[in-house]
Image: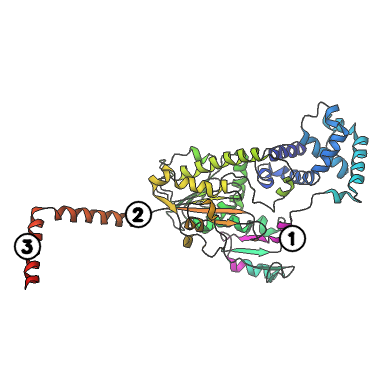
Amino acid sequence: MNFYFEAGKVLDKLDAKQGSIKGIIATLPEKDRKRTAAAVIETLKYKTVLNEVLDASKLLKEEKKLKSRNLVLVLVHDLLLSGGIQAGEGPIKQAILRHKTRLNSEFTRIKIKHGVKSTKELAQTGDERAAKIPRYIRVNTTCWSMEEAIKEFISRGHVLSGPFDHPKGFKKDDHIDNLLLFPPDSQWVEDELYKSGKVILQDKASCFPAQILSPPASDNGVVIDATAAPGNKTSHLSALMQGKGKLYAFERDRRRFSTLQMMLQKARCKNVEPVNTDFLTTSPEDPKFSTVTHILLDPSCSGSGIVNRLDHLLENETESSEDQESRLNKLSGFQLMMIKHAMKFPSVERIVYSTCSIHAVENEYVVRAALKSEECTAGRFKLAPKAEVLPTWHRRGIAGETESPDEAESLIRCSPGEDATNGFFVSLFVRESNTRMNKRKAGEEMTEEANASSSSPTAKRRKKKKKRASGISIGQ
């Protein structure tokens, strides 16, 4: 019965907009995760119909002990669609079984009402945009090379061609190193390469932050991933650092931290130190972090850009415009806090801020506010120019939501259904280089010296002599 309770809790969190389906499921104990995920996804597919059945049967009104509607939805799904409730004879199960005949009758009536011949026709179908997104597989270069991976796939019968040109076609990505594209319906979860950590299932857009941050591959490099779980971006950073230096991976949630640890172990990330702490509570002056030069920020967001994690199943849930605006404003406030805190680290040179949201309020608005903040001014941060932020990527920020066209060009956007990725946003803040600052300071000092010397008595006498000499020359 435990996995039913877990499934009900996941649905509660989804109703509260506390994350994506995959993100919330990732916090579950691994032993129950697969079964719970299946229960959640299947219930969501039929949620609209199941709610009709519950309302028509008046089950919740008659059985007062059934407090959680989402738990009942999962149990009724299995009763009507999966051959029965797979649990012991507890009071909750018995309360539902007492209404089995009525529940079946209402379900049959609804099928007739919708004019369907089979139960499967009642299910919500997948997001059509997901069919346009290849299955992206990042080769984990901590374990092996891209060349070795390509040879392995070819030996399995895969063909180097477009992922939509051949049932077993695959190709290299045009923008992200060590990323391969396979057909959307290809399955890898049970593949030994995935289980051993040699390949990471990671959307292309999700690979942008680490590549744009460009962490140092040196023994003295120090990097922070501020919101690391489940660990895909962390493992990508570790691979780009070639396992050198130190990478601190922060995750405040205990269960998500456990997931992060398992992911890092599987991906063989030897230079990563997981930290079960809220990044916002970390002191930038702590000697442990005062030498950090690169920070990746991928904080909680609305997840509105995700189309291939079955979150489309939640789209029929009603949310008023006022509720959405309030939720987005709270998220953007938190996101801005993260950026401003990162800017306080004394040695930080590059900060990537990214979201899987399509809303300007979480993207351009947050960047605009960060650029106007005291932390940004004091730290001499600015947006990196387009030349440093995947210049060959075609979709940039929304010009109408930024201070200038150049600012928009510094930003990255991905549009679900149009760019063969999930919806995504990436920005890169850079601190003006010490070299440039020193040159400017030196120039200012030279100007001050010149002004001071020109006002001295000796300088004035030289000027008078020069003028007299010029006057004689002209007269002659």
Number of numbered discs: 3
**At which x and y percent is residue 249?**
53, 46
Q: CA distance from mark 1 to mark 2?
A: 49 Å
**At which x and y percent is residue 252?**
56, 39
> Which residue does the image show at 67% across and 43% down from the upper left?
24
Q: Mark 1 highlights which residue?
A: 185
> Closer to us: mark 3 or mark 1?
3
Q: Quadrant of the C terminus?
A: bottom left
Farthest residue to the bottom: give it: 476
Amino acid type assigned to the residue bearing label 1 in the image: Asp
Q: In this image, 380 relative to 326: left or right?
A: left
Q: Nearer the viewer, residue 15 or 321?
A: 321
Amino acid type assigned to the residue bearing label 2 in the image: Asn
Could you say which quadrant of the image residue 202 lies in?
A: bottom right
Q: CA distance from mark 3 to mark 2?
A: 42 Å
Amino acid type assigned to the residue bearing label 3 in the image: Lys
Q: In this image, 152 relative to 56: left or right?
A: left
Q: Mark 3 highlights which residue?
A: 465
Farthest residue to the front: give it: 475
Q: Nearer the viewer, residue 62 or 326?
A: 326
Under tag 3, what secondary structure? helix
**At which x and y percent is residue 174?**
59, 67
Q: Mark 2 highlights which residue?
A: 434
> Closer to us: mark 3 or mark 2?
3
One can see residue 243 in this view: no
> Is the residue marked by circle 2 packed among few (<14), some (14-19), or many (20+) residues within 10 Å?
few
The magenta span reads 126-148
Under tag 1, what secondary structure? loop
Q: Earlier in the sequence, mark 1 or mark 2?
A: 1
